[in-house]
Amino acid sequence: MNRTFDLTNPIVGNRIQIRADLGTSDTTETPIVTDITWKYILLRPASEDTTKRVFHFTVIGHDEIEKLDFDKEELGLQDARSRATLLSDLWTTRDKEEILNFVGADNVNYTAFVVTYTGAGTNCYLKIDQTNRLLTTVLDGVADVSYDFKDKTIKEVVTYIHGLTDYTAVQDDNCSDTQSAHNLFPVFEVPCSGSAQVYYGTDIRQVIFNTQAPSEFKLSLDGRGDDRINISLREV
C-alpha cells in the first residue's frame, strides 16, 4: 500500500505528525512501515527575513605586498607581512573553524561615539568582538569591563559605558539612536586612556569559511614565490 502526503507548507516548523487510516478493523496483524521517502528543499529557516551572503575574492601573496599600496607596514607590526606569514595566517584562521569578524570591501566607517578612561590606571584598551557581540576593556593587563551588545543599539552601548565608574562615553551627533551595535567596527585593541573614537560601518559581518576554502595557487617557484589564495566566506 502506497500513500503520498502533500504538506501545505513544508518549510514552516520543524516537526510533523502523520496518521494513516488503514480502512479496516482487523487487528490480528500489525502493519509495518517498510519505506519512507522524504522530499525536501534546503532553504534558510522561515524565521530569517534576510538573505545570507557569500563572498569570493582572491588574496595576492608575496613579500611586502602592502608597499604596493604605499603603506609601509600594518598597524601593530614592525614590518610588512611576508608571503609566508600571510599564507600561514590564512590557513591558521581556517583551521580554527570558527565564526570570524569580516569587514567588506565596500565598508564605510562613521563615528559612533568617543570613549574615555578616566581612572587611576595606566593603560586601558577597548576591544569590540562582533563574533560574540562583546565589548570588553583590559586595564593594566587585567580584564575590566565586559558588555554583551547582542540586539542592542549603539545608544544603549553608550549609556552603559557612561554609567560605569572611571569611564565616559559620548555618542556622535550624526549617529542615529536606532543604529544597531551589530554594525560597530570590530577592533582588537584601541587605547582609551585618552579619548578614543569608536566607529560603526556599513558592511560589518559575521562569516565562516566555505568548504574547500581557501585554495592556494602557485604562480612562481623562483625566489620567494608568488601565490594567489582564493577565499570563499559565507555569512552566518
Image: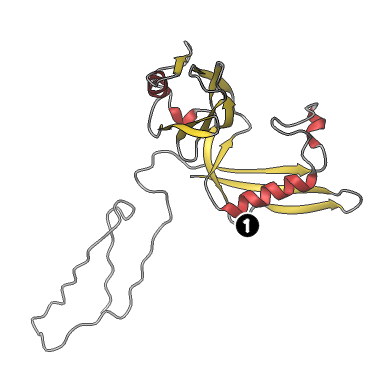
88 to the left or right of 26 = right
Nearer to the camera, 136 or 214 = 136
- In the displayed structure, would residue 15 be above or below residue 143? below
Nearer to the camera, 75 or 3 = 75
Residue at the location (33% across, 77% down)? Answer: 35
Nearer to the camera, 86 or 17 = 86
165 to the left or right of 228 = left
Residue at the location (91% across, 49% down)? Answer: 223
Residue that label 1 marks: 212
Residue 94 x/y as whole percent: 62, 52
Image quarter of the N terminus: bottom left
The amino acid marked with disc number 1 is Gln
44 to the left or right of 109 = left
The colour scheme used to paint the residues is secondary structure
Residue at the location (8% across, 81% down)? Answer: 25
Which element type, helix, strand or loop, lies under badge 1? loop
Taking the view exactly as shown, the residue that stands out farthest to the right is 222
- In the displayed structure, would residue 214 be above or below residue 127? below
Residue 227 x/y as whole percent: 79, 48
Taking the view exactly as shown, the residue that stands out farthest to the front is 120
- In the displayed structure, would residue 17 be above or below residue 124? below
